[in-house]
């Protein structure tokens, strides 16, 4: 079993070591570059290296101040698709659409409060990353504290119940292979029969 793990680890390390070689290879969309490289290597000259540039991210807004305001508001809105992410952090299609909608609303001159109100009117208080404390969201705010209190109460009750039980009501000590009971060293007292 240990040899199989070592072989698997060695294979994984070899695969990781080979990744840079695959990254340097020409992309499949450039057959002319690979044909030129193979023709150059056949002729005996130095092989040509195909270069490609990684795509760069284009700015989403021409105004960096507008983008910063959009990200501040998007950081307060929960992604409706993802688990525990804001729409600023999420890459889901809905989050991208909501960021674009916030950007357009800011360009129209709406305030962050108006945008939050529009989003809560449309999606409910769930869209807010920190929903307000009111009757409909009380479970969100008080639920964890109530669950913790119930768990602590159950723990105290179990401990009290076990403290009242007699020693013979607990499970017997496990037996050794020879049929002799296993004796805990802390339970033997000096002068007591063994």
Image (tube, rainbow, N blue to C red):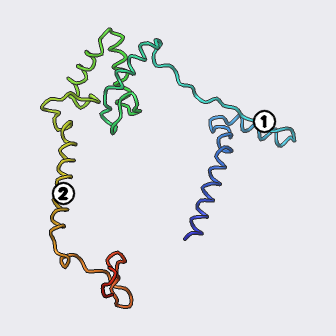
Q: CA distance from mark 1 to mark 2?
A: 75 Å
| Residue 134 picture location, percent across and down | 15, 29
Quadrant where the C terminus sits is bottom left
The image quadrant of residue 34 is: top right
The one nearer the camera, 141 or 33, is 141
Q: Residues within 10 Å of mark 2 (few under 14, many from 20)?
A: few
| Residue 46 picture location, percent across and down | 84, 38
> Going by the image, does 52 lie left or right of 188?
right
Quadrant where the N terminus sits is bottom right
Disc marking residue 156: 2
Q: Are marks 1 and 2 in contact (CB under 8 Å)?
A: no
**Mark 2 element type:** helix
| Residue 45 picture location, percent across and down | 86, 38
Residue at the image point whose x is 32% and y is 14% from the top: 105
| Residue with the mark numbered 1 | 48
| Residue 118 picture location, percent across and down | 24, 19
> Going by the image, does 106 lie left or right of 123?
right
The one nearer the camera, 28 or 91, is 91
């Amino acid at each position: 079993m240990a040899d199989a793990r070592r072989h698997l680890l060695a294979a994984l390390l070899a695969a990781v070591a080979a990744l840079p070689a695959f990254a340097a290879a020409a992309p499949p969309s450039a057959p002319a570059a690979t044909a030129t490289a193979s023709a150059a290597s056949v002729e005996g000259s130095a092989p040509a290296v195909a270069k490609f540039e990684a795509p760069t991210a284009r700015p989403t807004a021409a105004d960096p101040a507008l983008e910063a305001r959009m990200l501040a508001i998007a950081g307060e809105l929960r992604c409706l698709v993802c688990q525990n992410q804001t729409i600023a952090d999420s890459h889901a299609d809905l989050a991208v659409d909501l960021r674009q909608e916030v950007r357009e609303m800011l360009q129209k001159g709406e305030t962050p409060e108006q945008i939050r109100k529009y989003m809560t009117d449309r999606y409910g208080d769930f869209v807010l990353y920190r929903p307000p404390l009111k009757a409909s969201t009380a479970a969100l705010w008080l639920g964890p504290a109530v669950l913790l209190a119930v768990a602590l109460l159950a723990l105290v009750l179990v401990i009290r119940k076990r403290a009242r039980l007699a020693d013979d009501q607990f499970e017997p000590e496990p037996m050794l292979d020879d049929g002799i009971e296993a004796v805990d060293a802390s339970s033997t007292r000096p002068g007591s029969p063994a």
